[in-house]
Amino acid sequence: MPFLEHLAEFRRRALIVIFLFAVCTAALYFFVQPVFDFLIAPVRGSLTINPITTEVLGAMNVRFSLAAWASLVALSPVITWQFLAFMLPALKPKERKWVVPTFAAMVVLFVAGVAFSYRFMLTASFGWLAQQGAGFITFMPTANDVVTVVEFLLLIFGLAFQTPVLVFYLVYFRVLPYETLRKNWRTVYLVIVMLAAFIPPDWNWVTIASFAAVLIVLYESSMLLVRVALGKRIKRQAAEAGGY
């Protein structure tokens, strides 16, 4: 399509997402207490009192944040599909067969990442942060702080679980050859450990080790997927390079 038609298509799909997000957020604004209770359930043990607010607009901001976060999670399949559908005309026929599997994989992996963080990471991470002022700081977190930390921890694991999709398309679109990634696994592992040390908000070794371990497992799983799905291309490229 001409450039202006691409812009019109992008605007149409963006308006769909914005409209649905606004409607969903407005509706959920009045029903955020169950969302709040669900989100902070894993960190209740670290709270001596209910989270407080020190601002007049604090409660409203927390309600809006919770409603927006819940809407984003609920609409993530729609947002993902709109993005892939916008990219679809730019793909070749043989590339389009991967659109539906990619959509399914991205949604499942994001939900799996959020669930993993909620079930295994929140309690340890938040507990470590809460203990950093033990003995000289009274821990009375605001509701906004608690919600922000919890949402961030859930989000980064949801995004981290997209690693297989990222690696697959880096190889598929020849951005990075499979053999390059395979031979430089030590460098990849080092980058993963550095990301695990700096991305999470806490320096708890449990969080760092778990985040690094998850990324490494996902990376190796994605390399296996690439090897199986693109095996013929990998062998052909290796033969052309004199590897076989």
Image (cartoon, helix red, strand yellow):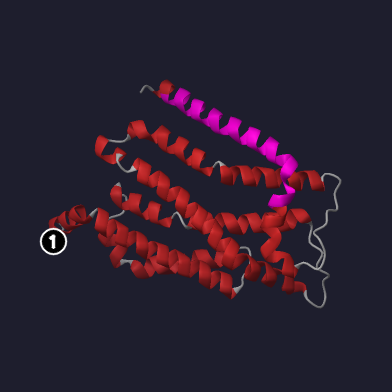
Image location of residue 174, percent across then percent down: 28, 49
Is residue 193 something one can see in this rendering? no
Structural crowding at the residue carrying mark 1, measured as other residues with C-alpha within 10 Å and reported as few (<14), some (14–19) or many (≥20): few
**Which residue is pictured at 47% across the width and 48% down the height?**
107
Image location of residue 54, percent across then percent down: 86, 53
Magenta stretch, overall SS: helix
Place residue 44 in its image quadrant.
Answer: bottom right
| Highlighted magenta segment, given as a residue range | 6-35
Which quadrant of the rendered structure holds the C terminus?
A: bottom left
- Amino acid type, label 1: Gly
**Residue bearing mark 1:** 242
Question: Is 78 one of the magenta-colored residues?
Answer: no
Of residue 79 and residue 172, the one placed in the foreground of this image is: 79
Image location of residue 47, percent across then percent down: 77, 67
Q: What element carries label 1?
A: loop
Which quadrant of the rendered structure holds the N terminus?
A: top left
**Which residue is pictured at 43% across the width and 21% down the height?**
4
Of residue 114 and residue 167, the one placed in the foreground of this image is: 114
